[in-house]
Amino acid sequence: ETVDFGLSEDDILRLVDKPELLLVGFSLIFQYHFHRLRKLAERLRRSGVECHFTVGGHFPSLRFESILNGIPEIDSVVRFEGELTVCELAERLAAGRDWKDVKGIAYRKNGDPFSNELRPLISDLDTIPFPLRNSERKFECMWKNGAFILPSDSCAMPSPTRHVPLRFP
C-alpha cells in the first residue's frame, strides 16, 4: 500500500500501526524532507510501530551515512535501484531470515553505517512491471486527469518500448 507523505502523522500512524506489518518503506527523494522523515519515524516508533523501517531514494542512496547517523529509527537504506532489493528484503523479513547480506542494502554494523555491495543495475527496464496507481487520487491538468511521475531510471536510459500512461481512464 502506498501512503501519501503529505498526510498528517496521525493519519500515517493509523495506516501503519498494524501488528502483522513487516516493513515500512520510506521514499526520500530530496534531502529537504530529511527532518520531516526523522520526526515521522520517531513518532511511529514512540507509538509502538516495531516493524523494519527502510528508506530509499536519491538522497539516501548517495548519503546513507547521513540517514543512518541522523535517524536512528531507520533499520536499513535501499541504495540506488531498489526494485529487486526491497523485494528480497521483504522476503527475508517474512521468512525470519537474516537480511544484512542483501545486495544494495546499507545498515549499522557495530554501530557504524555500512553498505553492502551494490546490486547490479537492471539492464532491461522493460522487465519491470508498471507501478500500481491509486485511481481514486486524481490530478487534473488542462481538463484531463493525470498523475505525477518523477522519473529517474528511464530518463537516464530511455527505452523506445517503455510507455508510461499519464491519464486515468
Image (cartoon, helix red, strand yellow):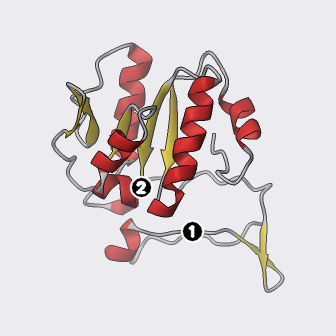
Which mark sits nearer the N-terminus, 2 or 1?
2
Residue 19: which quarter of the image? top right
- Which residue is at the front of the view, 78 or 87? 78
Q: Which residue is mark 2?
A: 57
How many numbered circles are shown?
A: 2
Query: At which x and y percent is residue 105?
Result: 28, 39
Q: Which residue is painted at 65% across and 23% down in the image? A: 47
Q: On the rendered structure, is 42 left or right of 90?
A: right
Is residue 158 visible to the viewer in this orientation of the structure?
Answer: no
**Amino acid, disc 1:** Ile
Residue farthest toward the bottom in the current orientation of the protein = 142
From this view, report whether residue 88 is shown above or below residue 98.
below
Dot 1: few (<14), some (14–19), or many (≥20) neighbours within 10 Å?
A: few
Q: Which residue is painted at 60% across and 40% down in the image? A: 40
Give the secondary structure at mark 2: loop
Q: Which residue is painted at 39% across and 43% down in the image? A: 70
Query: At which x and y percent is residue 95?
Result: 39, 15
Q: Which residue is painted at 35% across and 32% down in the image? A: 88
- For the residues labelled 2 and 1, the Cα–Cα distance comes to 14 Å
Q: Quadrant of the C terminus?
A: bottom right
**Amino acid, disc 2:** Gly
Dot 2: few (<14), some (14–19), or many (≥20) neighbours within 10 Å?
A: many
- Which residue is at the front of the view, 161 or 100? 100
From this view, report whether residue 15 is shown above or below residue 121.
above
Q: Quadrant of the N terminus?
A: top right
Query: At which x and y percent is residue 161?
Result: 42, 73
Give the secondary structure at mark 1: loop
Q: On the rendered structure, is 20 left or right of 94?
A: right
Residue 18: which quarter of the image? top right
Q: On the rendered structure, is 112 left or right of 162?
A: left
Q: Which residue is mark 1?
A: 149
